[in-house]
Image (cartoon, rainbow, N blue to C red):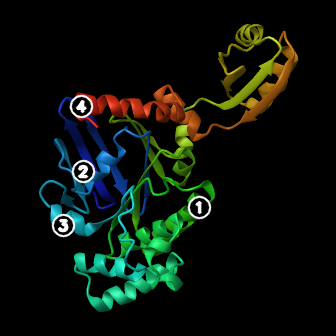
Amino acid sequence: MTESNILEVDGLTRTFGDFTAVDHISFSVGEGEVFGFLGPNGAGKTTTINMLATILRATEGDARIDGHSIKNDRIAVRRAIGLVFQDSTLDLELKAYENLRFHAEFYGVTKPEYEERSKELLKIVELADRANDYVRNFSGGMKRRLEIARGLLHHPRLLFLDEPTIGLDPQTRSVIWQYILKVAHEQDITLFLTTHYLAEAEYCNRIAIIDHGKIIALDTPKNLKRQVGGDIITLTTEDNQKAQEGILATFKLQAEAKEGKLIIVAQNGEELLPKMIRDLPVKVTSVALREPTMDDVFLKFTGREIREDEASNKEKTKAFMQRRGFRR
């Protein structure tokens, strides 16, 4: 393990019977990095975190966190990490500070250290004035902020965030991210997060795209977007089929027809677009030009949009449960 890496993963695999949830993945995470796992539900994100957090044993492979093996040094690994689960694990019948105190006792944090640390963290996530309030009265965003504070209470080197803003509205998600990045900076914490919200991937220093249990791309958001191949031009015309033929013949570019529009990926879109409007054999009725987004990146590497995969995920889950013999 290199000094600059807090996490190194080597051939990590998890199978459930004949189903491979995580398939021989290898990667590393540097100290202080915000590292993201991007993929649809069922891609293997949560299974990976559960193995790295020693909640679930790996079928094959290993990983080292702060120099400790997840197979052979499970206790040391657990001391080195914090974890914010996808589903809330707060006790709603306890007050905010009581939830933190219970966590501190579980991790062996001394009372003086707990008192100082809890005040510090509650202040950072702006819940200091709600420390004596029952958690059942908290909003979803407040609960998430309290869970982030709780996950950091025992001074972890690496904080896992499994879908940290799932179920929250876009405005609340944005606010939660302000707290996450603030805490990471002020506490010198490495973040490892999973998400299927493509916009959230922009917060990461590097992103691994995982699909069907395999990492199919890993780079910075900027470099991943570059691999899309250029700017995205969207056109509607009076005759899209004739326009497709004209784009191919004149500009040597493929135009994908989708939902009544033509989508073209091209270099130097600002320069190309006026020529395209002028030289096409049909009238252009609407036009849009933009730089690639993470939606485009996901589409390039997986061949589908993440929303399409989300829509079919319930059927995949149902089929898997049937294969495993589960019934309602």
Q: CA distance from mark 1 to mark 2?
A: 29 Å
Circle 2 SS class: helix
x and y percentages locating residue 273 in the rendered image: 80, 26
Q: CA distance from mark 3 to mark 1?
A: 34 Å
Q: Residues within 10 Å of mark 1 (few under 14, many from 20)?
A: some
Viewer-side label of 4, 3: 4
x and y percentages locating residue 199 in the rendered image: 57, 48
Residue kind at label 1, given as amino acid type: Thr
Looking at the image, residue 158 sits to the left or right of residue 279; the answer is left
Viewer-side label of 2, 3: 2
Mark closest to the chain's N terminus, 4 or 1? 4
* Image disc number at residue 239: none
Q: Residue at x 37, y 38 (%)?
A: 42
Q: Residue at x 24, y 31 (%)?
A: 19
Disc 2: which residue = 51
Residue at the bottom extreme of this rendering: 112
x and y percentages locating residue 48 in the rendered image: 30, 47
Q: Residues within 10 Å of mark 3 (few under 14, many from 20)?
A: some
- The tally of labels here is 4
Mark closest to the chain's N terminus, 3 or 1? 3
Mark closest to the chain's N terminus, 2 or 3? 2
Circle 3 SS class: helix
Residue kind at label 2, given as amino acid type: Met
Q: Is residue 47 visible?
A: yes
Disc 3: which residue = 76
Residue kind at label 3, given as amino acid type: Ala
Cβ atoms at labels 2 and 4 below 8 Å apart: no
x and y percentages locating residue 85 in the rendered image: 36, 59
Disc 1: which residue = 172
* Image disc number at residue 19: 4
Mark closest to the chain's N terminus, 2 or 4? 4
The quadrant in which the N terminus is found is: bottom left
